[in-house]
Image (cartoon, rainbow, N blue to C red):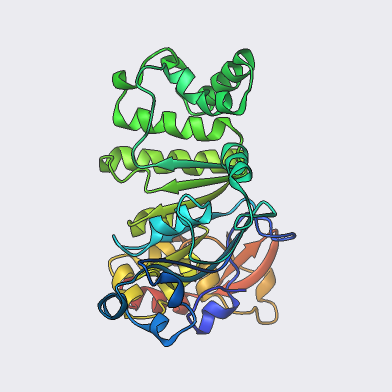
């Protein structure tokens, strides 16, 4: 089932995620608004709420930062919120754990009503169940790496021996065990951000929030850090909400991506759905420089098997990109059998691949 606002093939596309959708979402936000200004509470539910940001500001002096956002994030999912500066993405992530108070809406994290939570309950939520990784590392300069990693556990009241043991284990996981006794100033920017990741993982949160954590890093280090997030998520199965303004980063990391503009979500879907069926000109402008064949997979162009086709021809996982499928298609006269969980779920013939490659942006 698709969350996209697109049409056609998108409607039947199954999200290629390892998330668990058998129970309740780990995070559910419904109708979340954040407005700044003295008349903020008087705008929602009126015709003024449909005005553009500029029109509303000129008319009422109120600024909409988040506009009627509803999202579900499932256990084990990497959910990316993407948008340009000022789109509302960072305000949204802070609103979800009430670092910024929402103007309206319902928010549930780990079956806890965040809106109804008092100050003590919010502290417990942030200390034990949710971790945040920011662009600015926020490391404690006077503490060693291992003490920085153990800091969240110290706040929780964990004994020194236990928290240092856990911090050492996490440093091993992220490949920083050799610098455990160094100080942050002695590390490169990439290594400092890795310490920030380790600190977030050390408290064993159920949900990890990343607010543009790598945007200040140079491109090579940034890619290394993306690889690290992918690896850590695969090894730990953590649920992640990742904020970025960079579409290639969003496409690399996200099981699903929400694109924001002027405080609202203009499209929500898998990377394939966004690249293959952009909802409007705004999204299309975002994805125009992304090679479609590097993102779209066999599931996007496959058709149902005809009699006999399910038993003949080369097999490829249904998640194979068109780029990677081309050499196989070129070496056989038979259609490709797209396979998921050991079963043939579709057929991809040469014509379908060539047609997809001929489309603009391929």
Residue 338: tell me if it is visible.
yes
In the visual, does 341 lie left or right of 268? right
Please report the residue visible at 47 percent of the width from the left and 49 percent of the height from the top.
99
Q: What is the quadrant of the N terminus in the image?
A: bottom right
Please report the residue visible at 43 percent of the width from the left and 20 percent of the height from the top.
145
Q: Position of residue 211 (x, y in %)?
A: 41, 48
Residue farthest to the front, as pictured: 38
Report the number of numbered marks: 0
Q: Residue 244 appears in which quarter of the rendering? A: bottom left
Q: Residue 43 appears in which quarter of the rendering? A: bottom left
Please report the residue visible at 69 percent of the width from the left and 77 percent of the height from the top.
308
Q: Residue 185 appears in which quarter of the rendering? A: top left
Q: Position of residue 88 (x, y in %)?
A: 37, 62
Q: Position of residue 248 (x, y in %)?
A: 35, 56
Residue farthest to the bottom, as pictured: 47
Nearest the viewer among 45 and 358 is 45
In the visual, does 341 lie left or right of 323? right
Q: Relative to residue 68, is residue 48 depicted above or below?
A: below
Q: Relative to residue 295, is residue 206 depicted above or below?
A: above
Q: What is the quadrant of the C terminus in the image?
A: bottom left
Q: Position of residue 17 (x, y in %)?
A: 59, 58
Nearest the viewer among 10 and 326 is 10
Residue 326: tell me if it is visible.
no
């Amino acid at each position: 089932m698709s969350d996209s606002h697109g049409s056609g093939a998108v409607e039947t596309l199954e999200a290629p995620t390892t998330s668990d959708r058998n129970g309740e979402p780990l995070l559910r936000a419904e109708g979340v608004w954040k407005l700044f200004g003295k008349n903020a509470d008087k705008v929602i539910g009126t015709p003024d709420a449909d005005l553009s940001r500029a029109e509303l500001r000129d008319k009422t002096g109120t600024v909409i930062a988040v506009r009627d956002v509803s999202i579900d994030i499932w256990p084990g999912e990497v959910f990316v919120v993407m948008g340009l500066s000022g789109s509302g993405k960072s305000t949204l992530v802070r609103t979800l754990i009430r670092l910024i108070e929402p103007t309206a809406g319902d928010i549930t994290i780990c079956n806890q009503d965040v809106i109804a939570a008092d100050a003590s309950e919010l502290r417990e939520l942030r200390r034990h169940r949710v971790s945040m990784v920011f662009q600015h590392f926020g490391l404690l300069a006077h503490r060693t790496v291992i003490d920085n990693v153990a800091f969240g556990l110290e706040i929780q009241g964990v004994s020194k021996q236990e928290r240092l043991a856990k911090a050492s284990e996490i440093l091993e996981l992220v490949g920083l065990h050799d610098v455990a006794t160094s100080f942050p100033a002695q590390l490169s920017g990439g290594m400092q951000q890795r310490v920030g990741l380790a600190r977030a993982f050390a408290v064993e949160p159920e949900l990890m929030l990343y607010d543009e954590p790598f945007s200040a890093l140079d491109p090579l280090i940034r890619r290394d850090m993306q690889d690290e997030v992918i690896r850590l998520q695969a090894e730990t199965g953590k649920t992640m909400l990742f904020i970025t303004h960079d579409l290639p980063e969003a496409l690399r990391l996200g099981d699903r991506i929400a694109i924001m503009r002027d405080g609202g979500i203009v499209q929500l879907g898998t990377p394939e759905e966004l690249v293959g069926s952009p909802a409007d000109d705004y999204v299309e402008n975002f994805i125009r420089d992304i090679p479609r064949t590097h993102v779209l997979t066999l599931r996007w162009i496959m058709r149902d098997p005809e009699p006999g086709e399910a038993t003949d021809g080369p097999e490829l996982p249904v998640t194979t990109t068109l780029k990677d499928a081309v050499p196989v298609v070129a070496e056989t006269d038979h259609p490709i059998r797209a396979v998921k969980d050991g079963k043939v779920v579709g057929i991809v013939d040469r014509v379908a691949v060539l047609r997809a490659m001929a489309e603009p942006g391929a």
